[in-house]
Image: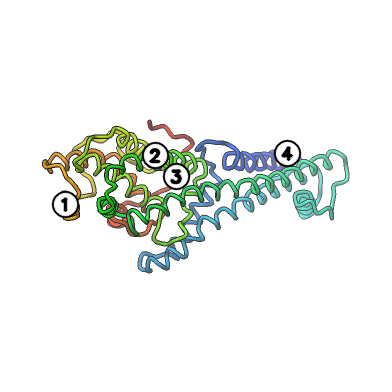
Amino acid sequence: MIVLRVVATVGGVALVLWAVLSAMKTIVLPRAEASIVVTALFINLRRVFDLICSPKRSYAFRDRVMAYYAPTGLLLLPVTWVIMVLLGYTGIFWGTGIKPLSEALAISGSSLLTLGFDRPANIGQIVISFTEALLGLGIVALVISYLPSIYGAFSRRETLVATLEARAGLPPSPAEFLVRYARIGWLDNLDEELFDSWETWFAEIEESHTSQPSLNFLRSPHPGRSWITAAGCVLDTAAISNSLIAKPHDARVDLLIRSGFLCLRRIADYFGIAYDPDPRPDDPISVTRREFNLLCVELEAAGVPLKPDRDQAWRDFAGWRVNYDTVLLALCVLVMAPPAIWSSDRAKDSGMRIKVRRRSSLPRR
């Protein structure tokens, strides 16, 4: 019996420390450090939602259901941590002499929730109950501070995504983006606007969506918008601007594309999505040459000045697109993005099955 009580005490301490470490990794630590508890919770919750959101269902239905996925996970996180602490301290109280196990559970619950209806007898156990009450208050305080930061980052993300609709339509399209700028005579300002707004956006997305991964699954207020399809549209527009539009080359657009595909790669690293970190410029991409040629016809009809060498333009575009093609499509599948041109419209047919797994670091550079 003594051995069993020692095991219960040690196991209880380990379970409590595990819960505290998980909360620290998720809320306090400002880097992409995965927690097994959080990862397991969101993976199993996603399996439940995937059963409801069968591909046979309409997208409108799946979007309505998936809108509750991330909020449900966020609400279950503190519940999970509280249960772990409750069970851990139950083991500690039972291991230190409180009998029976139901009484140890009652004292643990009373201490954790600061109800005060039950208390241990000796001073050592009273001190233990004080530490449990302190942990309970700490978890509540962390959650209170965590949710505003999550929704603050969400609001900043969605502000720029919403402005894209006026420029690129809904769903966003690089062709629509360029045609509208040509119609209003603003093509000369395209590179500057892309760089000034979206490079900062990509930097913020990389930081927030890896340190707070639930943000990836928070869906836009409008069912036709998504942060990942917006990212794909902006990257494609920048790649087309560099490769096809007849204008002086702007190196800032090169930096924008690089910051964009590095952002998507870091998020892909967190979720264990495989990709080639150093692809060849002539590696295959999901966009076909025929689609590119049709884009050229559309832009030319709208009066957008194009470079005469279309073969070289295609090679240049494909050389940029290959850096983010795989991760863009994979993230579209992961977040169940709405249909959008050159991204989620082909992701569903790519045959990819995303397996989210724990990654404690982001090794690729």
Front-most of 298 and 277? 298
Marks 2 & 4, CB-CB < 8 Å contact: no
Mark 4 highlights which residue? Answer: 6
Name the image quarter holding residue 266. top left
- Disc with the residue nearer the chain's start (2 vs 4): 4
Q: CA distance from mark 3 to mark 1?
A: 45 Å
- Give the amino acid type for the residue marked by disc 2 in the picture: Asp
Q: Earlier in the sequence, mark 2 or mark 3?
A: 2
Rate crowding at label 1 as few (under 14), some (14 to 19) or many (20 or more) other CA atoms within 10 Å. few
Q: Quadrant of residue 14?
A: top right
The reply, left or right, for residue 242 in relation to residue 161 is left
Tell me the CA gap for discs 2 and 4: 61 Å
Say which label, 3 or 1, has the lower sequence index: 1
Position of residue 4 relative to residue 298, above or below, is above
According to the image, label 1 marks what residue? 300
Q: Is residue 350 visible?
A: no
Q: Nearer the viewer, mark 3 or mark 1?
A: 1
Q: Nearer the viewer, mark 2 or mark 4?
A: 2
Residue at image mark 2: 196
Q: Characterize the local packing of mark 4: few (<14), some (14-19) or many (20 or more) Cα atoms within 10 angstroms.
A: some
